[in-house]
Amino acid sequence: TGDGGGGGGGAEARPVGYIEMRGGVATYKPIRDPWGDVVLPLTALLLGTALPKIVRALRRRR
């Protein structure tokens, strides 16, 4: 009763990559999140264009 001890603690595990073996050579291949390649540059672009306007508007309010 209760043997095993796989507890887990509510954590979630996700693979971050895999090892590809081809022609006798092992190569690590990361699994990339496609949204990370899109969201981060878009966020930087939006902040880069909006932040100066926000700062200018806040300075005018004083």
Image (spheres, rainbow, N blue to C red):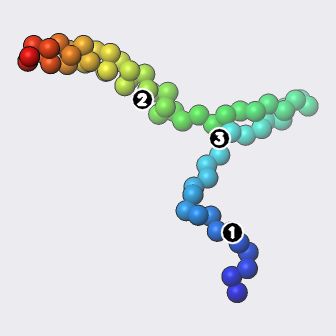
> Can you name the residue that lies furthest to the bottom here?
1
Residue 39 is marked as 2
Q: Where is mark 1, residue-wise? A: 6
Between residue 32 and residue 21, name the one nearer to us: 32
Total of numbered circles in the picture?
A: 3
- Eyeballing the image, is 61 above or below 37? above
Q: Distance between the residues labelled 3 and 1?
A: 22 Å
Q: Which amino acid does label 1 sit on?
A: Gly
The outermost residue toward the left is: 61
Q: In this view, does 34 lie above or below 3?
A: above
Query: Is the Cβ of the residue at disc 2 closer than 8 Å to that at disc 1?
Result: no
Quadrant of image for the C terminus? top left
Of 10 and 61, which appears nearest the observer? 61
* Amino acid type, mark 2: Val
Looking at the image, which residue is at 37% across and 25% down?
Answer: 43
Q: Is residue 53 left or right of residue 39?
A: left
Q: Which amino acid does label 3 sit on?
A: Val
Horizontal side, residue 38 vs residue 31: left or right: left
Residue 16's disc is: 3
Query: Residue 3 at x, y = what percent?
Result: 73, 79
Disc 2 and disc 3: Cα gap in Å? 19 Å
- Residue 22: name its quadrant: top right
Q: How far apart are marks 2 and 1 (CA)?
A: 36 Å
- Identify the secondary structure beneath mark 2: helix
